[in-house]
Amino acid sequence: MSLITLLSTWFFVLATPVFAQESLDVYVGTATNQVEARKTPIDTFGNGVLYNAPQMTGAFPKFGANLKLTPWLGVGGEMSWRASKGDYAALMYRPIFYDFYGMYTPPAKSKWFVPELQAGMGAANLRFYYEQRLCNNFTGCRASSSLVGTDNKFTTHFGGGFKTFIHNNWYVKPEFKLRWVNDLFQFGKNWVPEYGLSVGYTFGGR
């Protein structure tokens, strides 16, 4: 089963009414993932020419949903990806993250400010492209982008956020996530911190 199929199945399950359902959240947002560069240069094309690898940075749009099964416990899923391709050792790259998690909502004194904690697992998909500009006297110049390879990796993560309801069931949520990516040799560490902000809507009770 592909990662996208698995994610779609997960969201279908989240959207299916269950007897114990307390509420369903859907949200979109943006985040940044920052990882230092690897220290060893890469012979990208196998010709003895070494290229330095970059840090992982950039804006990552994301969307997700979570289902609160009890007043304190729930499950959820999320997908995020780098908005634009980044330079990587004479290639271009784009990471995509898939997260599935359990969620704990500690009791809160105010219904307008709701903390959330989560932990789970998922996958990272790193996609690498070779891009070039082709020119001739007949058609002019055009850009060409070819996918040269992908690398799928197992991930785990934990983190949390703070939902602030701004109007009825609409909320904003600043959040932090620390993701561990297995064998992330393309960068300097396996740990990927994520800082983000989401806007969402709660169907049902808060």
Image (spheres, rainbow, N blue to C red):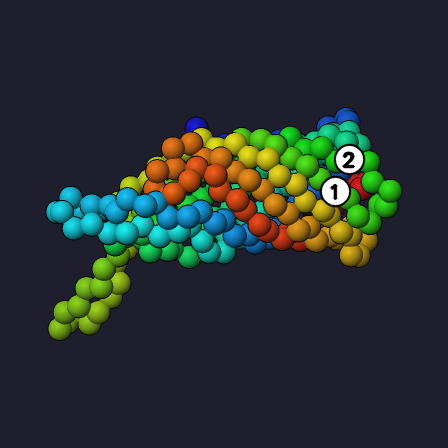
Identified at 24% across, 66% down, the residue is 142
Q: CA distance from mark 1 to mark 2?
A: 7 Å
- Give the image location of residue 198, x and y in percent: 64, 52
**Quadrant of the rendered image containing residue 135:** bottom left
Identified at 61% across, 45% down, the residue is 176
Q: Quadrant of the C terminus?
A: top right
Task: Name the amino acid, label 1.
Answer: Pro
Task: Name the amino acid, label 2.
Answer: Pro
Residue under pointer 1: 115
- In primary-sequence order, the first of circles 1 and 2 is 2
The one of 203 and 161 positioned closer to us in this rendering: 161
Residue 42 sits above or below residue 157 on the image: below
* CA neighbours of label 2 inside 10 A, class few (<14), some (14 to 19), many (20+): few
- Number of the label disc, if any, that sits on residue 142: none
- Give the image location of residue 93, x and y in percent: 35, 50
- Give the image location of residue 2, x and y in percent: 43, 32
The one of 180 and 173 positioned closer to us in this rendering: 180
Q: Is residue 65 visible?
A: yes
- Give the image location of residue 192, x and y in percent: 49, 42
Q: Quadrant of the N terminus?
A: top left
* CA neighbours of label 1 inside 10 A, class few (<14), some (14 to 19), many (20+): some
Residue at disc 2, secondary structure: loop
Question: Mark 2 and mark 1 in contact (Cβ < 8 Å)?
Answer: yes
Residue at disc 1, secondary structure: strand
Q: Is residue 71 left or right of residue 175?
A: right
- Number of the label disc, if any, that sits on residue 106: 2
Residue 2 sits above or below residue 37 on the image: above
Q: Is residue 99 left or right of residue 129?
A: right
